[in-house]
Amino acid sequence: MPVLTAEVVIVGGGIVGSSIAYHLTAQGCTNVLVIERETQQGKGSTGKSMGGVRAQFATAVNILMSLYSIPFYQRFDEVIGHPSGYKAQGYLFIATTPAHLAYLEQNRNLQMALGLQGVQALGPKDVQAIAPRLRSDDILGGNFCSSDGFVDPYSVMNGFIARALERGVKLQRDTAVTAINVEAGRVTGVETSRGTVATRTVVNAAGAWAASLAQSAGVDLPVAPLRRMLAPTEPFPDLPQSLPMIVDMTTGFHFRPEGLGFLMAWNDPSETPGYKINFDPLFIEKILTHAVARVPCFENVAVNPRRCWAGLYEMTPDHHAILGSVPGIAGLFLANGFSGHGVMHSPATGRILADLITHGNTEICDASLLNVDRFARGELLHETAIL
């Protein structure tokens, strides 16, 4: 059997891998093979995502990635020729403590300094005007950004890969990559369940399973899976579908419109790392407790456990992505550890990786801050605006 060859092999066909493939073709690199272990794309974190996109972060690198990604989503349908489902309904962060209010002010100042327009400070009455059904007696204020919103992750992924395939990219589904081959300090190919693929450039975009793949090349990748559960409600006409994503900073409970109902999320602090993708029905009572405390009319909402789901965040110690080349292994690139921000930052990630592969540098942000060697150097970033 002849050995397959490709200029670039991307391991993982989710939204991140698909974006990288698209952005590579935009720079003239079309001899690209995307390898997906499932029979369909999007069965990993992409299809389980809440689909939120925001620029309201606490670190410059995340803000700058959003400042590329959100305008990209705004013109996605025109540029890609497929719908993204982008809805600019905003993110509303509400603060009930002086500390949270000061935190929002600090973040807002940084966001505005980096060029974010449309982010604004809100007083209690402003919050009530946007979301009058919230319990508001304890709300001190908040932040709102009108260009934040949500997308359809599955549709975005399909759009990216469709355009990439039109430009010559190859996609191999139902294929597991078992090892990255390295000789004399450079990549030579990958081993798969269908045989060897020869290449001098590999991108690890394997999501929550990225660490074991990296280990096959001798790379210690600090990425761990962490379950996140989402609870969609049944149709609920008591609240308008025009609401933004609303985030209660006190509890971390957040929700947004979805269909004729709402999609609710809350990061259970008792959750432990592991490949747990089953939905725990006991989560419904936990999240509804927080939901009713902030939105009293949710007392009447119905949640069907059979419609709920769980997915995996790919967490890093500092809640920032790991992007770029691997020191000491020429041709090996990482696009991992998004800690819940993979969908919203997929356009920027695709562009950054394509830039680094083809040119060795990028103008999107200082990508060196996201290199895997930051952990060995002890130069961790600290994103605190985590949902």
Image (cartoon, grey):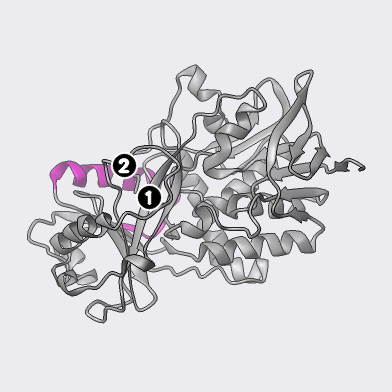
In the picture, the disc for residue 163 is: none
The image position of residue 122, as x and y in percent, is 22, 59
Identify the residue position indicated by label 2 in the image: 271
Q: Is residue 323 left or right of residue 120?
A: right
Asked whether 193 or 323 is in front, the reply is 193
The image position of residue 243, as x and y in percent, is 30, 71
Identify the residue position indicated by label 1 in the image: 228
Report the span colored magenta.
97-121
| Label 1: which secondary element | strand
Label 1 is placed on what type of residue?
Arg
Residue at x 12%, y 64% (from the top left corner): 135
The image position of residue 335, as x and y in percent, is 59, 40
Q: Relative to 104, say whether 74 is above or below.
A: below
Residue furthest right as drawn: 2
Asked whether 105 or 153 is in front, the reply is 153
- Do the residues under discs 1 and 2 have CB atoms within 8 angstroms? yes
Mark with earlier residue (1, 2): 1
